[in-house]
Amino acid sequence: MSFFGKIDFSTLSDTDKAIYHYLASNSDKVPYMRVREIATESHTSSSSVMRFIRKIGYESFSEFRKEFRGGDTIQTGKYSLVFPMLTVDQFTRNLEDKLQIIAEKIIECDNIIVFGIGNSGYVCDYIARRLAILGCNAFSMTDATYPIGAKLKNTTDNILIAVSVSGMTTEILETVNSLRHEEDMTIVAVTSDGSSHLANMADYVLDYRVDRYRVNHHDDLTSQVSCIFLLESLTNVVASLER
């Protein structure tokens, strides 16, 4: 399991090691087990299992068990390869209808700005390139200080696709807020939080569900797979309309 990678084995007791080895060898069973069952199978006690879970950084058993449900892990030497799952229940049921409506707007508009910063910015570069290949006048904006308002001052029929996992990034919100009241501007939010500030400011929302993952408190390792899937699907619909 990926969260075992930083364990200092010198701090583990013999009981801790017994629990560790059981969990590491039975990752397919753990998501469906109770604390008492893990204790029985590892020949320890329920209190020992809970102490081990807290020792490796989890506040509760449910939080710890949820980690197992995030994906399958294959051990390769000293590294762990974690394959995130992409499932239907990560997206809203009316996704196809929303993609169709937004794609039709894209076909009709003059300018498409795909806007995001940080990890989302790399996604924006990729999606803007896909749209450009399809003949759309699209470009990515990954700098929140870029004078986008001045650039679009004498243009009409613009779409801003704002990409933010949390939907609460201050720089994203400030830029979207400065543009959303423009008469010829359509805002599309792509976010994991359909009730976020960004979603509430948008004309259309493409939302998805994903577990946020940070290391060292500040470094973001949240998967962008769901976001890329949504935006690739959108460009695929645009491509189908262009044919």
Image (cartoon, helix red, strand yellow):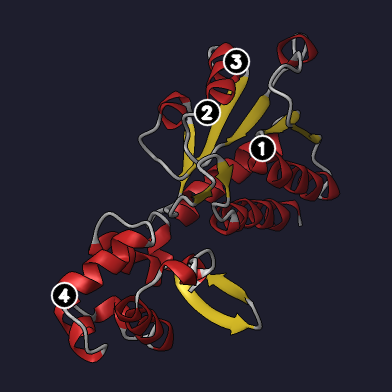
Residue 186 vs residue 86, the one in the foreground? 86
Q: Helix or strand or loop: what does disc 1 sit on? A: loop
Task: Name which residue type carries label 1.
Answer: Gly
Question: Is residue 69 at all visible to an observer of this figure?
Answer: no
| Nearer-N-terminus badge (4/3) | 4
Q: CA distance from mark 1 to mark 4?
A: 42 Å
Q: Quadrant of the C terminus?
A: bottom right
Q: Earlier in the sequence, mark 3 or mark 2?
A: 2
Q: Quick one: SS at disc 3?
A: helix
**Res. 63 visible in picture:** yes
Residue in the image at 46% along x and 50% along y: 212
- What is the three-letter code of the residue carrying label 2? Thr
In the image, residue 159 sits, relative to residue 65, either above or below, namely above
Q: Where on the picture, by quarter, is residue 52?
A: bottom left
Between the C-alphas of marks 3 and 1, the distance is 21 Å
- In the visual, does 131 lie left or right of 50? right
Q: Is residue 207 left or right of residue 127?
A: left
Circle 2 Cα neighbour tier, 10 Å, few/some/many (<14 / 14–19 / ≥20): some
Q: Which mark is residue 118?
A: 1
Is label 3 or label 1 in front? 1
**With respect to residue 10, does 240 lie above or below?**
above
Q: CA distance from mark 4 to mark 3?
A: 56 Å
Q: Amino acid at mark 4?
A: Ser
Q: Which residue is identified by label 2?
A: 169
- The numbered disc on residue 46 is 4
The reply to whether callout 1 and callout 2 are in contact (CB within 8 Å) is yes
Q: Secondary structure at mark 2?
A: loop
**x and y, in percent, of residue 39 in the image:** 20, 82
Residue at label 3?
179
